[in-house]
Amino acid sequence: MVKKNYIKIARNSAKIQISELKKINKVFNSSFIKAVDLMANCKGKVICAGVGKSGLIARKVSATLSSIGVSSFFCDPGTARHGDMGQIQKKDILLIFSYSGNSEELNDMLNFANRFGIKVVGIASSKDSILLKASDIKLLLPKVKEADITSIVPTTSTTITLVLGDTICAAIQHKKNFSKEVFKRFHKGGSLGRTLLLVKDIMVTGKKIPIIDRNKTIEQAVKIISSKKLGLVLITKKGKVFSICTDGDARRGLSKFSKKEKIEKIATRNPFKIQEDITANKALSIMNQRKITSLVVSSKSGRVKGICHIHHLLAHGIK
């Protein structure tokens, strides 16, 4: 096969999937709404299950549900019969994925759910399948053309199943008034967690802030700068930032003036300030643009709230 044909095949495969995915709109009906409401209001756990490729999708959807604050875990129907079904409680909900809906491994789990009155949300492409017949809420996937060269290998069918799982999660987010702040609580680590990190999460506050009265001396300022180890000191007036003096400013000041000279003489007035609700990434960008290593964090009225230092950003993986 000529290698340039690889691109043609890939483009055709993608074209088929993009076209077939439009059929998913048929699933967004009253049953979809009922499924979202049921899972969003779940008092127990949403247990995702599936076999083979559907199992991989179920694992992914379970992880997404957990990251948006819905208690969830994956349960393999094939091994559940050996004791794992004991984890399933009556207040839980089973979200089961199976494109055919007729995987034999589902039988024991469906019988267990029926016996103990556990709600089942089934996702399959056949309304006469074992899964949908046993489900309390039935989400009927459309039949789609597979995107491989034989039109046999599961490709589009797995994609549309995953998309449905993700749309369920998106709808639950809306139902629960989910926000970035809430997401951050469940997703502390990784690059995504760092993206959501705010200045207020890492800034120095309270007694750790190096502050000095404007009438104090350069000598006194140097002592505070050395003890607080942030390389600067803030000069305040009635609780608001009046000026700032860096370690470099203080050293240069000592070479020109008496150590008893007032700090106000060498300090820089009206330093650049940020608010605590901007992202840590944004703070680092400002530092790089201004070629500085610290930022004053203040309220809208100008009162001092903290100091954001580049060392704190780097320590949290902000680069």
Image: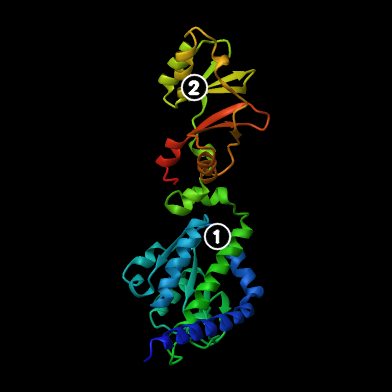
- Looking at the picture, which amino acid does disc 1 mark? Cys
Secondary element at tag 1: loop
Where 13 falls versus 65 (above or below)? below
Secondary element at tag 2: helix
Q: Residue at x 54, y 14 (%)?
A: 263
Q: Which numbered disc, 2 or 1, marks the residue that appears first in the sequence?
A: 1
Q: Farthest residue in the front direction?
A: 256
Q: Residues within 10 Å of mark 1 (few under 14, many from 20)?
A: some
Q: Nearer the viewer, residue 216 or 40?
A: 216
Q: Residue at x 57, y 68 (%)?
A: 167
Q: Residue at x 44, y 19 (%)?
A: 251
Relative to 280, 302 lies left or right? right
Q: Coloring scheme of the render?
A: rainbow
Which residue is labeled 2 in the image? 249
- Looking at the picture, which amino acid does disc 2 mark? Asp
Q: Farthest residue in the right direction?
A: 301
The residue mark sitting in front, 2 or 1, is 2
Q: CA distance from mark 2 to mark 1?
A: 59 Å
Q: Nearer the viewer, residue 296 or 1?
A: 1
Q: Farthest residue in the left direction?
A: 82
Where residue 193 sits in the image (x, y, percent)?
A: 47, 50
Residue 125 in sight: no
Which residue is labeled 1 in the image? 42
Where residue 71 sits in the image (x, y, percent)?
A: 48, 57
Q: Residues within 10 Å of mark 2 (few under 14, many from 20)?
A: some
Q: Residue at x 38, y 77 (%)?
A: 52
- Please state, as top left, top right, bottom left or bottom right, where the N terminus lies in the image: bottom left
Relative to 167, 75 lies left or right? left
Residue 295 in sight: yes
